[in-house]
Image (spheres, rainbow, N blue to C red):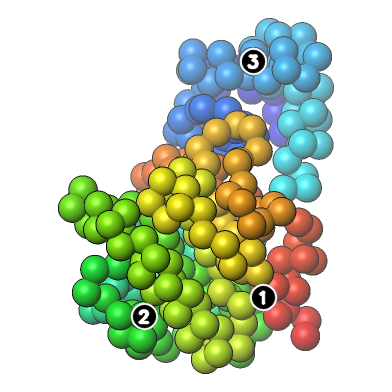
Amino acid sequence: MATLQSGSQGTDVKVLQQDLQLLGYTITVDGDYGNGTQTVVEQFQKDNGLTADGIDGPETQAALNNLVAGIVQGIDISHLNGPVNYNTLSSDGISYVFCKASQGTGFTDPQFQTNYKELTGLDIMMAPYHFFEFENAPAQAQADNFFKCNVDFTKQGILPAVVDIEWQSSDALNQYIIDNQAACVQLISDWLTIVATQTGKTPIIYTNANFWHDYLGNPSGFGQYPLWIAAYQKNPPPIPPGWADYTFWQFSGSGGISSVSGQVDRDRFNGSLDDLKKLAGVGI
């Protein structure tokens, strides 16, 4: 890669910006090496004992590549994202994609079937996720809605199902969770049991440590489910009680990669690529 500096533009600059974002730096991925990118490069250089000149030369590139090399990257998408160039995801370093499949008892994501078809035709692992609702939303009805998406969990490359447990669309619905905490925790447990039985895979729980504590009261009995934690920060995320560590970390809710138009959530897997392949049944 050529030396990059203020005024540089293009794909190489986007790759640099994506890598810095992956390491937790706040930076816009736009392919323009402006003042903002220069400032972040200077900070990266200071953090790693390099000459802080704001120029992405061979030493800076080597340090950056060394830190990024072992990180297994992913994104999560829904119909709310812009167009996806599926064929370039691998060149963006993406190994897996979480795709919204369903929500509550009746909504299915209109982009899911396209995402599912395109990704399963590539060497990209994928996981469908269900956005969980709590009021007037029985666990079986929510599971049935999720299963209507017709994901074949026996196929290699399909990660376990995900249940997205987070803030609802209104304060009233969030207050409902607090007022009916025990019943809501039981709903989650029931959904997980139903989906694990039908798919033959242990589902993944997506949540945020603050939501898990403030609205659900840090319930016990969920530590056997892989944890996908949302925490938009540079340092490793806080882990709710019951889990020893995270399996996935959504580290940015406003990230950017060349393959997706507009902003996209970005994720890190806590393990090697071989570990991820085992979770997705690749090679079995």
Reading the image, the residue beneath label 2 is 139
Position of the C terminus by quadrant: bottom right
Tell me, yes or no, if residue 264 can be seen here. no
Q: Are marks 2 and 1 in contact (CB under 8 Å)?
A: no
In the foreground, 9 or 152: 152
Rendered residue at 50%/28% (across/down): 27
Reading the image, the residue beneath label 1 is 280
Work out how far the residue at label 2 is from the one at label 3, CA to CA, in angstroms: 48 Å
Q: Amino acid at mark 2?
A: Ala
Label 1: few (<14), some (14–19) or many (≥20) C-alpha neighbours in 10 Å: many
Q: Is residue 265 above or below residue 97?
A: above
In the foreground, 238 or 214: 214
Count of labels in the image = 3
Horizontally, residue 146 falls left or right of residue 272, namely left
Disc on the earlier residue, 2 or 1: 2
Give how far across and how far down residue 46 sits, in percent: 72, 13
Q: Amino acid at mark 3?
A: Gln
